[in-house]
Image (cartoon, rainbow, N blue to C red):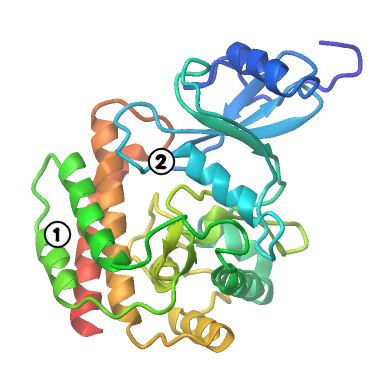
Amino acid sequence: MSKGTPPPQPQDREDPPGLDLERLREHLGRERPGMAGGPLRARLIEGGRSNLTYRVTDGTASWVVRRPPLGHVLATAHDMRREHRVISALHDTPVPVPETLLLCEDESVIGAPFYVMELVEGVPYRTAGQLAPLGPERTRAVVLSLVDTLVDLHAVDPEAVGLGDFGRPDGFLERQLRRWGKQLSASKNRDLPGIDELHEALGRALPASPAPAVVHGDYRLDNVLIGADDTLKAVLDWEMSTLGDPLTDLGLLVMYSSDLGLPESPVSTTSGAPGHPSPAELIERYAARSGRDTSALAWYTAFAWFKLAVILEGIHYRYTLGQTVGAGFDRIGELVPVFIDHGLTTLKEG
């Protein structure tokens, strides 16, 4: 370590799981000469439950590296090229995203495709307890800014930013239901009462989609970074983005803003924070600012409960095989029935 170079943070490691730092440094030296000025250290950024995110530093500068999870990668769910493409395309729009620096699809470098992007400082608020110190007024402003940014995203012209072929909007909801049904089959290794009933009920009640837009696919408060001034600095985790029905994003946000009825949860939920807007207020703000009809949002919210049940079951499956890293995975499996029940209730009660 050269004189004057700040020491690495205590969490930084020379051998984080899933990231060969020496091979990464060699690749950066070939593709971006001068970018890394010394040996690399890194740490896994906790909170993600799918693709792995690392903060990497050479002791002076820092970046973020994204790669697929370790083992059991479901088809199309962990496509680094797609993530890199959509973030790059949105960089000059009103949607705040990090600048992309490098894409590598050569699996021989670290064992999987990956990309590197700028490090944006900010907080991904995950729980009501983390939001509470902001106080009611600041909490309300932060959550409403999440809705406003979603409206900005859905207002982007896909053709104008080079994303005209980023997805197939026709039949989007039908394909989503089929896709998540297949994902469930690929990861399910136990009996899950009610999940087939929910899947079939959603298929019988498909709404007519509005005009297509770029959708994030996993839009929630802990997938964005909030700065010290309470402004939204960056939208992260674009692994499920595509062209499709924008109300799927809103339904997901409403789901994450609903009370799970659990004392604690490893899944993001901030609804209990003082000042947090209600799901109804989020819907009203989105409708007023976007001009879209949200009368069928119960279906989209029920679909969000189903989708998250499938995702959590996939994470639980990888955990049982010892193929994932991070804290909280031992409790994921017990949440799946809760999400199924919420989905059935939302669809039945509207």
Discs 1, 2 touching: Cβ within 8 Å: no
Please tell me how crowded label 1 is: few (under 14), some (14-19), or many (20+) other residues with Cα within 10 Å.
many
Residue 304 higher or lower than 43, as above or below: below
Lateral position of residue 139 relative to residue 171, left or right: right
Residue 31 placement (x, y as % from top left): 69, 22
Q: Residues within 10 Å of mark 2 (few under 14, many from 20)?
A: many
- Residue at image point 59% right, 27% down: 43
Name the amino acid type tagged 1: Ile
Percent x, y of residue 347: 22, 77
In the image, taking residue 193 as reference, residue 165 lies left or right, namely: right
How far apart, in angstroms, are the residues tagged by discs 1 and 2?
21 Å
Q: Nearer the viewer, residue 263 or 296?
A: 296
Q: Is residue 316 above or below residue 322?
A: below
* Element marked by disc 1: helix
Q: Looking at the image, is 102 positioned above or below residue 313? A: above
Q: Residue at x 53, y 69 (%)?
A: 273
- In percent of width and height, residue 107 lies at 46, 20
Label 2: state its secondary structure.
Answer: loop
- Asked if residue 118 lies left or right of residue 74, the reply is right
Residue 174 sits in quarter: bottom left
Q: Earlier in the sequence, mark 1 or mark 2?
A: 2
Residue 47 appears in the figure? no
Q: Which residue lies under the disc numbered 1?
A: 195
Q: Which mark is residue 50?
A: 2
Report the residue at 25% width, 84% height from top. 350
Q: Nearer the viewer, residue 228 or 220?
A: 220
User: The disc labelled 2 sits on which kind of residue?
Assistant: Ser
Nearest the viewer among 158 and 307 is: 158
Where residue 40 sits in the image (x, y, percent)?
69, 18
